[in-house]
Image: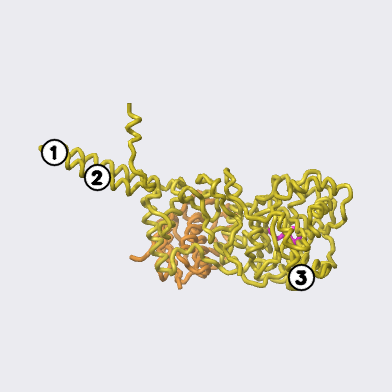
Chain colours: A yellow, B orange
């Protein structure tokens, strides 16, 4: 049973400087900086990869497999995502990339784009037959499904319950390989060449199905430089193995999936912030007369995935060029999927991860505490406390994960109050007392009390040093 | 009202692009207190329709929301022209929205009927030349 909140995005701690860039960009406010390092709340994370994109220190990384994984299997099949074809300059023939993958060490290649055409066909049928669920929302981008299950539960019933092309490709590829070689399934490895961390997470923790048929995920950027020399060789005599047409290859860009639906009644949005706006409006029923909604959490679609090398919009132009000479779709009479390969076999359930308490009364009380805390916070959303907004810090405090003095502004004002109180007391001690030894004793008592109060504010717990004396000359 | 959360929103009459901010904010509060998705949906649709009415007809106003463990109560108060015939206004399809608003796709005349449909209780108090107060309640189970 896979961990439903497993993530392939992780932090390389040694590289993290505790800056606040990623915490501000995370669309679900899943990241906090604590003790100088970023940490991700796994229930909120949707693997969109925004943090990987923003991190200037390259500390946010993706867990993917290396080519060594090929050694675990007797027969391996590469599943290239269509966006892979757009990573290379001057590519005219997809067969060159596919042949190069064979030279890289894979026994066989099965294009995800080919499976995408089958999913398009099944989608057309499903959309036509289920007007009650319009608009249907595409489920090819796993981050979208993860976002909807935690934040837009009212839209779960609109999710298109079909497996994404990569899953269909893995199943078909392995079935074909088993027939061809007679090997048992555990000796056959279907390895996805991925544009993003979201799909790497999907392989270990799928949605809509119990277990994924994908055996491993290699990042597109990891094979890119290895493929270049092999493609030069392959160019001389490429094998004719490409099976996808315009529709399948088009899935690599935003607007490609709806292109396969042959309808004008659609909306295609890309970029996680834009997707969230569309979903908010859809939830409020501000528009509903559409049949289908394609959503991609990366800008430009899968070409914008963080594990790709090329600029997404340049890649988009390259895919257009590649598509120019392809037929609309290639027939797949040999690729008939079993009925169980396409539709979902498990529902997606609402995960109320944002709930504050275990019941309504507790949650309402915590909400009131949050409101009270917000009155004290300066409202700057500066991020110095490690939370993206003042409200997020208030939530953290109420959940028991932070304290008020994490707020630098509050700390400053507490120190100021302390300083004012003790300055006054110290002066009074000198003027009030006529007996000098008694007044010295009083001063010493105040200093003692002051030291212990300051150390309570000092989160780092260092003893006071005399550095400031050295600076005064 | 002691164990209540009180939220206040100021609705701008000038800026159409901000219409919907209040209902969006209320939605995330409801999500955090664990209201069911159905209640969250009904509240936010009713609130959004009310908010839009305030922008189109009344030059904005103030929305106060009280959340208790048993219900969500929304009070939408404006200082607009008032509603001369409340019964007529509640009819589906009847709209007094100006033409420029209609060209934006609003003014279908379904606002008040929708608000009534999605909420458990709704009351309208209105005085010509003074303003209108709409009170809506949705029960929390």
Tag 2's secondary structure? helix
Work out whether disc 2 and disc 3 sit on a shared chain.
Answer: yes
Q: Alpha-carbon neighbours of circle 2 within 10 Å: few (<14), some, or many (≥20)?
A: few
Tag 1's secondary structure? helix
- The chain letter under disc 2 is A
The magenta segment is: A259-266
Residue matched to label 3: A184
Q: Measured from the top left, where is residue A50 in percent x and y?
A: 59, 51
Q: Measured from the top left, where is residue A354 in percent x and y?
A: 49, 62
Tell me the chief SS of the magenta region. Answer: loop
Mark 2 or 3, nearer chain start: 3
Marker disc for residue A42: none
Q: Residue at x 15, y 39 (%)?
A: A439
Q: Residue at x 51, y 44 (%)?
A: A17
Q: Disc 2 and disc 1: Cα gap in Å?
A: 16 Å
Classify residue A404 as left or right of residue A246: left
Tag 3's secondary structure? loop
Classify residue B131 as left or right of residue A310: left
Mark 3 or 1, nearer chain start: 3
Q: Measured from the top left, where is residue B63 in percent x and y?
A: 43, 58
Q: Nearer the viewer, residue A294 or A10?
A: A10
Residue matched to label 2: A448
Work out whether disc 3 and disc 1 sit on a shared chain.
Answer: yes
Residue A80 magenta-highlighted: no
Q: Disc 2 and disc 3: Cα gap in Å?
A: 76 Å
- The chain letter under disc 3 is A
Q: Measured from the top left, where is residue B3 in percent x and y?
A: 35, 66
Asked if residue B89 is positioned above or below residue A468 in the image, the reply reads: below
């Amino acid at each position: 049973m896979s961990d439903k909140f497993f993530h392939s995005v992780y932090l390389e701690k040694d590289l993290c400087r505790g800056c606040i860039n990623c915490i501000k960009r995370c669309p679900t406010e899943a990241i906090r900086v604590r003790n100088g390092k970023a940490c991700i709340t796994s229930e909120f994370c949707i693997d969109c990869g925004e943090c990987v994109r923003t991190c200037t220190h390259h500390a946010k990384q993706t867990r993917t497999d290396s080519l060594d994984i090929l050694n675990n299997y007797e027969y391996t099949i590469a599943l290239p995502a269509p966006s892979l074809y757009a990573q290379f300059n001057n590519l005219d023939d997809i067969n060159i990339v596919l042949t190069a993958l064979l030279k890289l060490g894979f026994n066989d290649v099965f294009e995800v784009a080919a499976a995408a055409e089958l999913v398009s066909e099944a989608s057309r049928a499903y959309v036509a037959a289920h007007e009650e669920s319009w608009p249907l929302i595409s489920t090819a981008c796993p981050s979208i499904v993860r976002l909807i299950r935690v934040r837009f539960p009212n839209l779960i019933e609109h999710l298109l319950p079909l497996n994404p092309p990569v899953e269909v490709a893995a199943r078909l590829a392995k079935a074909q390989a088993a027939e061809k070689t007679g090997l048992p399934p555990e000796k056959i490895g279907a390895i996805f060449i991925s544009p993003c961390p979201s799909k790497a997470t999907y392989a270990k923790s799928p949605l809509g199905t119990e277990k994924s048929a994908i055996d491993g995920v290699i990042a597109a950027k990891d094979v890119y430089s290895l493929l270049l020399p092999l493609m030069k060789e392959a160019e001389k005599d490429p094998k004719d193995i490409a099976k996808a047409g315009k529709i399948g290859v088009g899935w690599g860009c935003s607007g490609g999936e709806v292109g396969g639906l042959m309808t004008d009644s659609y909306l295609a949005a890309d970029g996680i912030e834009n997707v969230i706006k569309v979903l908010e409006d859809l939830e409020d029923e501000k528009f509903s007369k559409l049949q289908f909604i394609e959503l991609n959490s990366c800008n430009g679609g899968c070409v914008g995935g963080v594990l790709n090398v090329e600029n997404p919009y340049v890649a988009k132009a390259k895919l257009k060029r590649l598509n120019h000479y392809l037929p609309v779709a290639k027939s797949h009479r040999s690729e008939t999927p079993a009925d169980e390969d396409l539709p979902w076999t498990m529902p997606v359930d609402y995960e109320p991860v944002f709930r504050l308490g275990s019941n309504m009364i507790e949650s309402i009380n915590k909400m009131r505490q949050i409101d009270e805390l917000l009155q004290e916070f300066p409202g700057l959303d500066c991020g110095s406390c490690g939370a993206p907004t003042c409200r997020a810090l208030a939530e953290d405090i109420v959940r028991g994960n932070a304290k008020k003095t994490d707020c630098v502004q509050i700390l400053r004002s507490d120190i100021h109050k302390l300083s004012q109180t003790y300055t006054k007391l110290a002066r009074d001690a000198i003027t009030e007392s006529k007996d000098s030894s008694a007044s010295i004793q009083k001063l010493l008592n105040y200093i003692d009390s002051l030291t212990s109060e300051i150390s309570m504010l000092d989160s780092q717990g260092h003893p006071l040093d005399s550095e400031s004396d050295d600076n005064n000359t | 009202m002691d164990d209540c959360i009180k939220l206040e929103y100021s609705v701008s009459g000038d800026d159409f692009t901000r219409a919907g901010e209040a209902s969006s904010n209320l939605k995330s509060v409801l999500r955090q207190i664990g209201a069911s998705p159905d209640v969250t949906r009904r509240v936010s649709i009713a609130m959004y329709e009310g908010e839009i009415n305030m922008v189109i007809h009344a030059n904005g106003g103030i929305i106060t929301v009280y959340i208790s463990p048993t219900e969500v109560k929304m009070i939408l108060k404006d200082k607009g022209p008032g509603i001369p015939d409340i019964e007529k206004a509640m009819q589906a399809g009847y709209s007094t929205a100006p033409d420029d608003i209609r060209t934006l796709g609003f003014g279908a005349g379904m606002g008040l009927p929708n608000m009534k449909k999605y909420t458990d209780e709704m009351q309208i108090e209105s005085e010509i030349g003074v303003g209108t107060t709409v009170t809506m309640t949705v029960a929390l189970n």
